[in-house]
């Protein structure tokens, strides 16, 4: 399914998330997240930094949510904001988005192994929770999926290449 950029505003949001993913470097899985305010202005962007920071919570979404809350400066609530992320959020990130009261989550590639926005679990639409953001999956999914696939292809190739003898 082809999505025309001039007809779908979520394409621009995902392009920003794809650009953010490039900051992940070579060590971290290239996931990018961007938080947009209720007016559509970009508030924060981040890339995965677990390896770089040695922090298991340094997922792109968590870092971007923290930055956005700091930019808004009126507490932790991100009511009316949109979180755009290249890969379906995990349980930690989906839970953080719910707790932050994010209005919308727009994501690119599904994550069948850890995805918590519909693939493996569906944290964000659980009726037992007091907040349920709107969700738009699959925006620029081929590009987002290829970003992750190429990272792991490269990682596997590096691990299977024998070290040079000295």
Image (cartoon, rainbow, N blue to C red):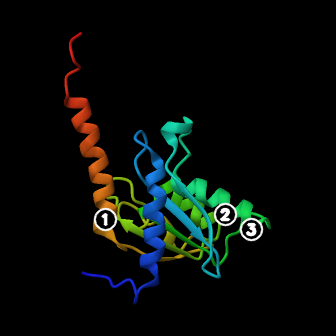
Residue identified by numbered label 3:
72
Residue 45 location (% of width, % of height): 57, 60
Residue identified by numbered label 1:
143
Q: Which of 54 and 22 is in front in this view?
A: 22
Instruction: Give the Cα separation between the discs numbered 1 and 2.
Output: 25 Å
Residue farthest to the front?
Answer: 166
Please tell me whether residue 48 is drawn above or below residue 27 in the rendered image: below
Select label 1 or label 2 by which is in front.
Answer: 1
Circle 1: element type: helix
Q: Quadrant of the C terminus?
A: top left
Circle 2: element type: helix
What's the mark number on residue 4? none
Q: Which residue is drawn at 43% across and 69% down?
A: 15
- For marks 1 and 3, the one nearer the N-term is 3
Residue 12 location (% of width, % of height): 46, 76
| Contact (Cβ within 8 Å) of mark 3 with mark 2 | yes
Going by the image, does 72 lie left or right of 121? right
- For marks 1 and 2, the one nearer the N-term is 2
């Amino acid at each position: 399914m082809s999505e025309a950029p001039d007809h779908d505003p979520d394409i621009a949001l995902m392009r920003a998330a794809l650009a953010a993913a490039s900051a992940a470097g070579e060590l971290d899985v290239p996931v990018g997240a961007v938080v947009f305010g209720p007016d559509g202005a970009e508030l924060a962007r981040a890339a995965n930094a677990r390896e770089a920071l040695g922090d298991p919570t340094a997922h792109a979404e968590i870092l971007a949510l923290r930055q956005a809350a700091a930019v808004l400066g009126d507490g932790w609530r991100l009511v009316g904001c949109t979180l755009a992320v290249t890969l379906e959020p995990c349980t930690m990130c989906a839970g953080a988005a719910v707790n932050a009261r994010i209005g919308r989550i727009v994501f690119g590639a599904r994550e069948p192994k850890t995805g918590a926005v519909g693939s493996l679990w569906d944290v964000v639409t659980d009726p037992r929770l007091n907040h349920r953001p709107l969700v738009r999956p699959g925006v620029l999914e081929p590009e987002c999926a290829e970003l992750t696939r190429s990272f792991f292809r490269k990682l596997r190739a590096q691990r299977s290449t024998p070290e040079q003898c000295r």
